Amino acid sequence: MGVLGTLLRHPGDVIPLVKVKRMADKAKRLPKEKNLAYCYDVLNKVSRSFAIVIQQLDEELRDAVCVFYLVLRALDTIEDDMAIPIDEKLPQLLEFYQYIYDPAYSTNCGEKHYKDLMANYPKVTAVFLKLKKPYREVIADITRRMGAGMAKFIEKEVMTMEDFDEYCHYVAGLVGIGLSNLWGASKMESKEFIGEEKLSNAMGLFLQKTNIIRDYLEDIQELPAPRMFWPRSVWSKYAKELDDLQHEENRDAAVQCMNELITNALHHSLDCMKYMARIKEASIFRFCAIPQVMAIATLAECYGNENVFRGVVKIRRGLSARIMLKCNNMLEFATGFKYFANQLVHKVQPNKDPNGEETLRAIEALEEVCDKIIAEESEKMHVARVNDDSLPMSTRMLLWFLFGGYFTYAWRLEEVRESLGVNRHAGDPRVDAFQRWFATICFIIISLLVIVGKKR
Ligand code: D61
Ligand code: MG
């Protein structure tokens, strides 16, 4: 189906797509300083979606998070390059956290934009070295731990569910932990975020597991050697070899296997909701919320979907644009989560799927939490609206002009009479005096009301 067909089916996508295109164009405008400009340019090239959410962060954190991303992306490029022999890769992964302080460090690995990043790495280092010390320390600490974890798994197969969680902790959970440390160090969020590992880890696991599930085919077909992250304890229930799942004759088993992994990933969603509920600052909230809602939308799209074993399954661009615009607060976030949880639950066939019942339970628990948050947040908004008894600006102005007019009229009664061709002394002076004082008192009261602006 072409672009036009998609838009005709989803006309509501058009405006979000235009708005997000504008955001993306804005994200492509580069800073003046040349090293910083390189960082944002290469960020846009290696990750369109993270580029947009990083660019909308507050100035205080933007460059630190951009560099954090690029440092880890560089480390991951070494991990992912299947052409590097293990005896060279291992020390590189273990020592990478030291290279990030070396202004001359660069290397030749990866492909396309990743290769470019590795070749121009000194530009990233230049920006890294200018970051505040607490930010540098967080980045170096996470890089060290991630490199050690990647090294551990370089020859180790993901066998059990514990291995799966451990690997995902190294490559993504640690990102969540590092980000929490950055939030705390910036003082934009409470210092409780510093050292918080459980919920921060879950944020990463949910995203990484979603990627691993979606990318089955791409990873298994990787050249020169396949990358495999699906845990053996799960896939071995459905096939002799993980590779077999890509073949047409094993489609049903493959889909059931994937569904089991999706159900496992869904178990992290409750901790993700808890993490999100703790965030106060709006740009950090959006930064964290958007990837999470994208992830649950991707899981809903993949669930029961044979196409995962035929090619790349992605959410509609229009849908991802709508998600980007509807992640501004806890109410929108819980509403989005619930929407996709609901899409997923409608695909569950408990009699056909051996894990159907468990999936239903996981979704039920998630929907319950979403409903609770939606109710609480709607109530908060309602209370805020009721307590907000300030008069709108337009009403204040109107009142002020009306009584200002009356005030002027009362003090210039004689001129008014004259201009109407009446004798200026035609009125009762006592009534005139009363009008002047009455208008003055009214005007003072209204002026105060306009400034304070309360209804009651
Ligand atoms: C809040 C907001 C964003 C979060 C978060 C909490 C918690 C964790 C994460 C982002 C990280 C999620 C990673 C999910 C995507 N997976 C990958 O990119 C895999 O590589 C993992 C190692 C490098 C991590 C790089 C990274 C990613 C996102 C960041 C970040 C660093 C720094 C700051 C903000 C976001 C995957 O990569 C393959 C590819 O996409 O090319 C892999 O090799 O498995
Ligand atoms: Mg990797």
Image: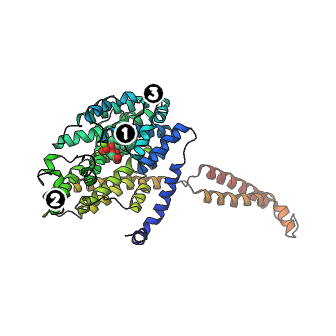
| Mark 1 residue element | loop
Mark toward the viewer: 3 or 1: 1
- Residue at figure coordinates x 42%, y 69% from the top left: 7
Judged from the image, the quadrant occupied by ligand 1 is top left
Name which quarter of the figure residue 185 lies in. Answer: top left
Q: Residues within 10 Å of mark 2 (few under 14, many from 20)?
A: many
Nearest to the eye among marks 3 and 2: give it: 3
- Work out whether mark 3 precedes mark 1 in sequence or the reverse, and give the earlier one: 1
The secondary element bearing badge 3 is classed as helix
Q: Is residue 278 visible?
A: no
In the image, residue 13 sits, relative to residue 101, either above or below, namely: below
Residue 60 point in image, percent of width and height:
50, 37
Identify the mark at residue 356; answer none if there is no mark.
Answer: 2
Q: CA distance from mark 2 to mark 1?
A: 43 Å
Way the structure is coloured: rainbow
Residue 133 marker: 3
Q: Mark 3 is on which residue type? A: Lys
Front residue of 188/318: it is 318
